[in-house]
Image (spheres, rainbow, N blue to C red):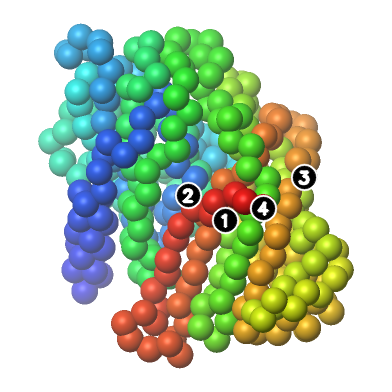
């Protein structure tokens, strides 16, 4: 029974990976803001190398995983030849992953060796001097939450080749700090946001250090219920490197009671928080991933499913 379930999960994850276009983002550093290796889930990374180097030459691909509550740094080098493609589980086979989608693939991925983790991943080309050599997407199937999702890597469009690689993991062009956040009635959907703090990560990556800046999120003095009624009061929630928050984290106790359970609206504003040693780095903005878990009371076909999308900045 366990083997049958695992085969089904692997087939589903591989299927989502195949349906997601590998060429949906282009850059020499790609940011994948969410992966998971919890039991019952598969995260599948798909990459292609459109670099112009000699076809038979291996191009170094640098994987930098940031995981757990402290955004612990874990990295290693893989490789792809020119015009090559690679799809593989994030998790190593020793912790529940299935390895390469095509077992005979000679490309070299970097698997993540721990189960039960969430985090984000930066993948960069190191051999070819180009700004559009690497493309990729992440597919996730999680039987615990009902999540089935696929999204493109976020492109920094900078040359990251060479040992010094000043632009590796440099996402300082992302400056989003203001987001209009909405949430549905609690009896219908449980809403949370996964926040990745971004900026120029090149120094942290080069030093093998943890990425450490944060963002303090505030409701900026007001929150609205589902009928546009505003309730004043200010509170904040700080996310260091990466982490999750829910709507009530940005409400005072009185605001939460006044808004109730019918949903509402928050104009969330972020303030950058400096790193605390030994972690390093300076933030420029945030990537927010909205997670919506449909409650059982909703009924089929949506009950038990989870939806994921990237929030857009505004106001």
Q: Position of residue 166 (x, y in %)?
A: 56, 15
Q: Is residue 20 left or right of residue 244?
A: left
For the residues bearing labels 1 and 4, Cβ distance under 8 angstroms:
no
Seen from the viewer's position, the closer of residues 189 and 5 is: 189
Q: Earlier in the sequence, mark 1 or mark 3?
A: 1
Q: Position of residue 211 (x, y in %)?
A: 64, 34
Q: Is residue 236 left or right of residue 184?
A: right
Say which residue label 1 marks.
Answer: 194
- The alpha-carbon separation of the residues under discs 4 and 2 comes to 25 Å
Q: Residue at x 78, y 74 (%)?
A: 230
Q: Position of residue 244 (x, y in %)?
A: 62, 58
**Residue 131 figure quarter:** top left
Q: Residue at x 33, y 86 (%)?
A: 300
Q: Secondary structure at mark 2?
A: strand
- The alpha-carbon separation of the residues under discs 2 and 3 comes to 22 Å
Residue 34's label in the rendered image is: 2
Q: Secondary structure at mark 1?
A: strand
Q: For label 4, count other residues whose C-alpha is less than 10 Å away and answer few (under 14), some (14-19) or many (20+).
A: few
- The alpha-carbon separation of the residues under discs 1 and 4 comes to 20 Å
For the residues bearing labels 3 and 4, Cβ distance under 8 angstroms:
no
């Amino acid at each position: 029974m366990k083997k049958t379930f695992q085969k089904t999960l692997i087939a589903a994850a591989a299927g989502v990976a195949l349906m997601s276009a590998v060429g949906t983002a282009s850059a020499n550093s790609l940011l994948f803001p969410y992966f998971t290796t919890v039991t019952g889930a598969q995260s599948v990374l798909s990459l292609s190398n459109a670099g112009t180097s000699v076809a038979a030459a291996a191009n170094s691909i640098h994987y930098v995983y940031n995981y757990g509550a402290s955004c612990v740094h874990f990295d290693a080098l893989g490789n792809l030849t020119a015009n090559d493609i690679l799809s593989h589980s994030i998790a190593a086979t020793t912790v529940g992953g299935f390895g390469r989608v095509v077992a005979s693939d000679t490309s070299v991925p970097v698997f993540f060796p721990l189960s039960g983790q969430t985090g984000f991943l930066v993948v960069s080309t190191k051999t070819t001097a180009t700004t559009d050599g690497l493309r990729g997407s992440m597919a996730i199937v999680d039987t615990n939450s009902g999540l089935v999702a696929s999204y493109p890597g976020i492109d920094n469009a900078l040359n990251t080749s060479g040992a010094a690689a000043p632009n590796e993991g440099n996402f300082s062009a992302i400056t989003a700090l203001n987001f209009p956040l909405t949430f549905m009635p609690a009896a219908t959907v449980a809403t949370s946001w996964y926040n990745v703090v971004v900026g120029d990560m090149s120094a942290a990556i080069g030093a093998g250090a943890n990425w450490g800046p944060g963002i303090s999120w505030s409701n900026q003095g007001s929150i609205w219920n589902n009928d546009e009624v505003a309730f004043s009061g200010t509170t904040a929630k700080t996310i260091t490197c990466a982490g999750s928050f829910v709507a009530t984290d940005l409400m005072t106790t009185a605001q939460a009671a006044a808004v109730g359970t019918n949903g509402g609206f928050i104009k969330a504003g972020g303030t950058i928080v400096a790193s605390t040693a030994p972690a390093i780095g300076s933030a420029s903005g945030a990537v927010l991933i909205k997670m919506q878990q449909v409650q059982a009371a909703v009924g089929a076909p949506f009950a038990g499913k989870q939806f994921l999308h990237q929030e857009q900045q505004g106001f």
